[in-house]
Amino acid sequence: MGDFNSLPWQKPRKLIEADGFQSVFSLLVSKQPPTVPTSEYRPMLKKWQRLAIGKGLSADDIYVRGLSVKDAGIFEEKSDHFGLWVTLET
């Protein structure tokens, strides 16, 4: 898992996927949730940044290989990124 600061189609995440790892969110839903910015951080952005980001970007993920994903989601704490969680089965 990680704070990749890259979007799902960008190189860091594509390299992870090329090694056989899968996004837990892509296994559960067709679209990954926005993970940045949180509601606390959004007001700190400049107007052009808010326009560019829109409803948010998926800059973080959890990747698995060889495990079954039961559930996954996001939570908000004191950060510019939402936290991620997953429930796995072997």
Image (spheres, grey):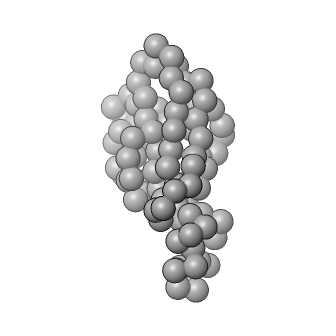
Viewer-proximal residue among 45 and 7: 45
Q: Position of residue 41 (x, y in %)?
A: 53, 71
Q: Residue furthest bottom?
A: 47
Viewer-proximal residue among 85 and 22: 85
For the question of whether residue 80 can be seen, the reply is yes
Count of marks placed on residues: 0
Could you tell whether 15 is left or right of 50 in the image?
A: left
Q: Residue, x 42% and y 18% (percent of image)?
A: 66
Q: Residue, x 52% and y 80% (percent of image)?
A: 45
Q: Quarter of the image holding residue 72?
A: top right
Q: Residue, x 58% and y 86% (percent of image)?
A: 47
Q: Position of residue 86 (x, y in %)?
A: 52, 33
Q: Residue, x 56% and y 69% (percent of image)?
A: 40
Q: Quarter of the image holding residue 30?
A: top right
Could you tell whether 81 is left or right of 16 in the image?
A: right
For the question of whether residue 9 can be seen, the reply is no
Up the image or down, 50 lies above or below 15; here it is below
- Figure quadrant of the N terminus: top left
Q: Residue furthest top?
A: 90
Q: Position of residue 78 (x, y in %)?
A: 48, 62
